[in-house]
Amino acid sequence: MRNRVTLLFLGTALAAMLGNATVRADKIVDPKTVAPEFREAAEKRHAEQLKLIECNNAAKVAKIQRRDLAQYVAECFDKPVDKPQ
């Protein structure tokens, strides 16, 4: 009986930890909702997040294998952005 309770407790704790892992994703920063003194940093983080999402989507379109994904995204992220004048 005691082993069953311990096993049930451990199983519940493990399920709770795994369930919370997917919920903790970073939200996209909205610079408009940040205090004025932190707005510049928030705008920079927002641009980084959008670039990262763009690189991940490009990797999906290019069907990059999971083992090569980190390298592909890092190279994509480091590329300079062409700004139209």
Image (tube, helix red, strand yellow):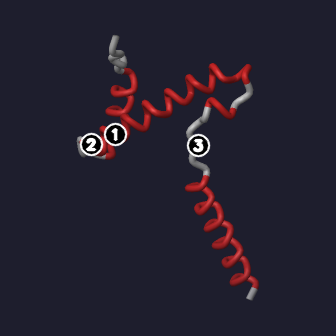
- Residue 13: x percent and y percent? 68, 67
Mark 1 Cα shell of 10 Å, populated few (<14), some (14-19), many (≥20): some
Quadrant location, the C terminus = top left
Residue count near mark 2 (Cα–Cα under 10 Å), binned few <14, some 14–19, many ≥20 = some
Q: Whole-percent x and y of residue 34?
A: 70, 30
Name which residue lies at 63% across and 66% down: 14
Q: CA distance from mark 1 to mark 2?
A: 6 Å
* Numbered circle sitting on residue 64: 2
The residue at which mark 1 appears reads as 69
Mark positioned earlier in the residue sequence (1 or 2): 2
Residue at 70% from the left image edge and 23% from the top image edge: 38
User: In whole angstroms, how far apart are the C-alphas of marks 3 and 1?
Assistant: 21 Å
Q: Are marks 1 and 2 in contact (CB under 8 Å)?
A: yes
Q: Is residue 43 left or right of residue 68?
A: right
Q: Which mark is residue 28?
A: none
- Left or right for 60, reference 47: left
* Disc number for residue 27: 3
Callout 3 environment at 10 Å: few (<14), some (14 to 19), or many (20+)? few
- Closest to the camera, between mark 3 and mark 1, is 3
Residue at the far front: name it: 85
Q: Is residue 8 left or right of residue 69?
A: right
Q: Which mark is first along the chain, 1 or 3? A: 3
Expressed as whole percent of the image width and height from the top left, the position of residue 75 reads 34, 26
Q: Quadrant of residue 26?
A: top right
Residue type for callout 2: Ile
Which residue, as the protein is rendered here, is positioned at the far top?
Answer: 85
Residue at left offset 68%, top offset 78%: 8
Place of residue 81 in the rendered image (x, y in percent of width and height, measured from the top left): 36, 19
Contact, mark 3 vs mark 1 (Cβ under 8 Å): no
Q: Quick one: 23 or 54, which is closer to the camera?
A: 54
Amino acid type for the residue under numbered disc 3: Lys
Asked which quadrant contains residue 29, the reply is top right
